[in-house]
Image (cartoon, grey):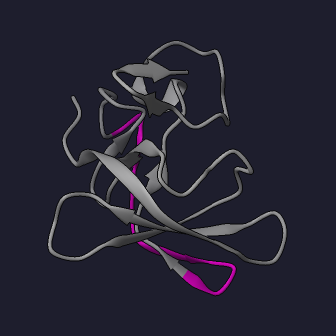
Amino acid sequence: MYANYKIARCIDVEEMKSPLRLLTLDVGEAESVTVVTNSSLVRAGSKYVVALPSAIVPAGADPASGSVVKPTNVGGRRSNGIICDAPMLGWGTGNANVPVFLNGEEWVV
């Protein structure tokens, strides 16, 4: 259900042309991952759920009805995933466009 989803620590947030931000994420691999988002709620040091390339959004969806995440250019920068909100994770329909983040030991949605 959660293939190619990771918990990522945000290392850096670079402001782009409003409302875009380029995030540099540590996903526990040798190299960091960059993701472009339009959320103003992201902060360096926080942990988020990220859907990486080949993940199916929303989580658990059939590939025919969901969307497969692919690397793409957004605002002239490479985005290699999507910062997830609750609906993308299959956690209901509330809090769309609000990134799910880990606050200590609890998920905040």
Residue shown at the point (19%, 58%) measured from the top left: 28
Q: Quadrant of the C terminus?
A: top right
Q: Where is residue 62 drawn, in percent x and y?
A: 30, 31
Residue 37: percent from left, percent from top: 62, 59
| Magenta-drawn stretch contains 53 | no
- The image position of residue 51, as x and y in percent, is 36, 48
In the rendered view, tell whether residue 3 sits above or below residue 37: above
Q: Where on the picture, by quarter, is residue 33?
A: bottom left
Residue located 33% across and 21% down the image:
105
Q: Is residue 26 above or below residue 30?
A: above
Residue 107 position within the rendered picture, expressed as x and y whole percent measured from the top left: 43, 21
Q: Is residue 86 left or right of residue 50?
A: right
The residue located at (62%, 50%) in the rendering is: 42
Q: Residue furthest left?
A: 30
Residue 73 on the magenta span: yes
Q: Nearer the viewer, residue 38 or 8?
A: 8
Picture quadrant where residue 3 is located:
top left
Figure check: 70 above or below 40: below
The front one of 44 and 16 is 44
Q: Quadrant of the N terminus?
A: top left
Please give the range of residues in magenta.
64-77
- Image mark count: 0
| Left or right position of 44 against 29 | right
Image check: 104 left or right of 88?
left
Instruction: Look at 52% across and 22% down and name the residue there.
Output: 108
Q: Residue furthest right?
A: 18
Left or right of 87 on screen, residue 1: left
